[in-house]
Each structure stands twice: as C-alpha cells, then as structure tokens.
Amino acid sequence: MDKDSNSQVLHRLELHPLPRVLSRPHVSSEMSASAGKPEVRIQIPETSVVASLAEIQEQARNEGYQQGLLQGQADGNRLGHEEGFRSGRLEGLAAAEKENSLSVQQAIDAARETMRKQEAQLGRLLETIPARIADCLARAEDDMVALAHESVCRILGGTVVSSEGVRQAVKQAMAQLRSSEQIVIRLHPGDYQLIADAAPLLPGREVSCVSDNQVSLGGCLIDYPQGTLDARLETQLRQFTDLLLRIRQSASAEIVAGASAADLAVLKTNAQSALPDRQEE
C-alpha cells in the first residue's frame, strides 16, 4: 500500500472514542415483531483502534523514511557530482594556469639567455674593432710604403746611371760635411768612370775619388778624418722607407686612439638597439 492509498483510508476513517450503535434495516416481519425489544449495541475496543492508527502511522513513517532516504541519496549523489565537477573544474583550471605560467616563464628565461649571449658576442665583436681597423690600415699602409719605395726606385733609376746624376749625388753628400780636410769619395766602378775627378765639384777642398765594388750605382761613401758618411743609394732608400713606416705607424696610432671608449660605447649602444627588446615578466 502506497502513501496516497494510506492517506485516502485515513481520510475516510471516522474514529469515535465512545461505542457506536449500529442500526439494522427492516428485512422481515419477524424483525418488526421484535421491535419492542431493546437494541443490541456493539462496542469496538478503544485500544484496538489506537493500535491500528499507530500501525498505520508507523507504516507511513517507514515508507516516508524510505522515500526520503532514496530521495536524499539521489539528491546527495547529484549534489556530490555537481560539487565534484565544480571542484575538478577549478583544479583543472588552476593546473592549466600553472602550466601555462611555467611555459611562459621558461620562454622568457630562454629569450633572456639568448639575449645575454647575443650581447656578449656583440661586446666581444666591438672590442676587436680597433685592432681590426689598425690591422687593415697597417696592411694598406704597408702596401703604400712598398709602392712609394718602388716608385722612388724607378724615378731614381734613370738618373743614377748618368754623369749628372752621380755628380748631384756627390754634391748632396758633400754638403753634409763641413770639414775642409782631405776627403776620399768611394764610388761604384761604373760611376767612377763617369766622374773620375770630383775636384771641380768641391773647390777649396782636397778631394780624391776611388773605385769601390762595395758601393752600388748612384751612391757613394765619403771618408773624412772624423769618420765615414754613407751616401749609398740603398741606404738613402732604406732611410726613406723607415720614414714612411714611422709616418704610417703614427697615423695608425692616431686613428686607433680616435676610436675611444666613448665611441665604442656608442657603437655598442647602436648595435644593441637593433636587437629585439627584452621580454619582461
């Protein structure tokens, strides 16, 4: 019996604490004949009615309890599922956010490490710039010195084989001497034939010329009491080359000095500005 049927029975049931008189219908004349006799009353014990009511209430209570228990379990399962779903969703979102944050941080760290390596490489490159500039200038200037030396040799080559060229070389060498004592001029045999007598070149001085195989064409060695003046052509060319080299070294030093630390800092700053900006957290 379900809950609704119990409710219907309880609705139709009339309980009386006092005994109830039950009437009979008139079914025959015999019954009419005994009408004058006293009525018979049937009394229902009150304890039986109370016991039946208690049983019905207990049964209804049990059924209601079972239905409530089942409904509570269903609601509990539903609420537990919803709570578990909500909790799992929140935990999943938190885990995903943490993983994404870790990935972003790792990407930032990798970008910073790449930037640091690029800056270090750029710094090393900038530090080598002055030395590279000096090296390039040195090679270029060495070529210029060699070219100038060769040009001078070619220019002088046509004059040293002439008598006028030899005379001019002797005059220039003698002009460096102030001694009026005896002077001996040593010349290459070929030059000696061109200018055997140097006296007309140096009036007022006692001069003599000798042939010397150690002297190259176009030059001379002048012996005087205080020593020897080396006016050989190769010596003059070597001095000329040394002069060019000194000039080249001086110019290189000035160029390298011009590339000061401030200039290098500007170069480094400009180069770094071309790199991507740092990623910040």
Image (tube, grey):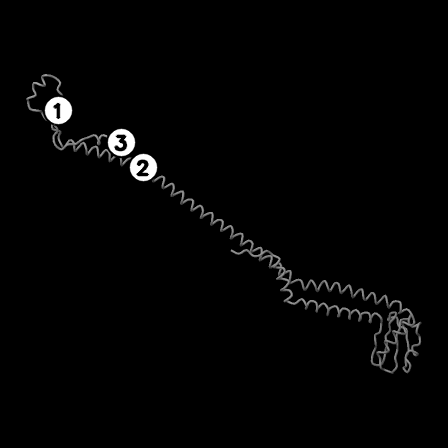
- The three-letter code of the residue at mark 3 reads Asp
* Residue with the mark numbered 1: 23
Which mark identifies residue 222?
A: none
- Measured as percent of width and height from the top left, residue 205 is found at 90, 82
For marks 1 and 3 on the same chain, the one whose residue lies earlier in the sequence = 3
x and y, in percent, of residue 136 in the image = 72, 62
Q: Is 194 placed left or right of 8 in the picture?
A: right
Residue at 85 percent of width and 70 percent of height: 233
Residue at image point 80% right, 70% down:
240
Q: In which quarter of the image is residue 86?
A: top left
* Separation of marks 1 and 3 at Cα, in angstroms: 32 Å
Which dot, 3 or 2, sits closer to the camera? Answer: 3
Q: Residue, x 91% and y 70% (percent of image)?
A: 162
Q: Classify mark 2: residues with Cα within 10 Å, few (<14), some (14-19) or many (20+).
A: few
**Count of marks overlaid on the render:** 3
User: Which image quadrant is residue 254 in?
Assistant: bottom right
Q: Which residue matches tag 2?
A: 71
Q: What element carries label 3?
A: helix
**Residue toward you, 111 or 39:** 39
Position of residue 80 measured from the top left corner of the image (x, y, whole percent) = 36, 41
**Sequence-earlier tag: 3 or 2:** 3
Q: Mark 3 points at which residue?
A: 4
Q: Mark 1 or mark 2, which is nearer the start of the sequence?
A: 1
CB of mark 2 within 8 Å of CB of mark 1? no
Image: 85 above or below 40: below
Residue 34 image-quadrant placement:
top left
Identity, as a three-letter code, of the amino acid under mark 2: Gln
Secondary structure found at label 2: helix
Residue 251 percent location from the top left of the image: 73, 69
Q: How far apart are marks 2 and 1 (CA)?
A: 48 Å
Location of residue 16 with respect to 220 vertically, above or below: above
* Residues at marks 3 and 2 touching, judged by CB atoms closer than 8 Å: no
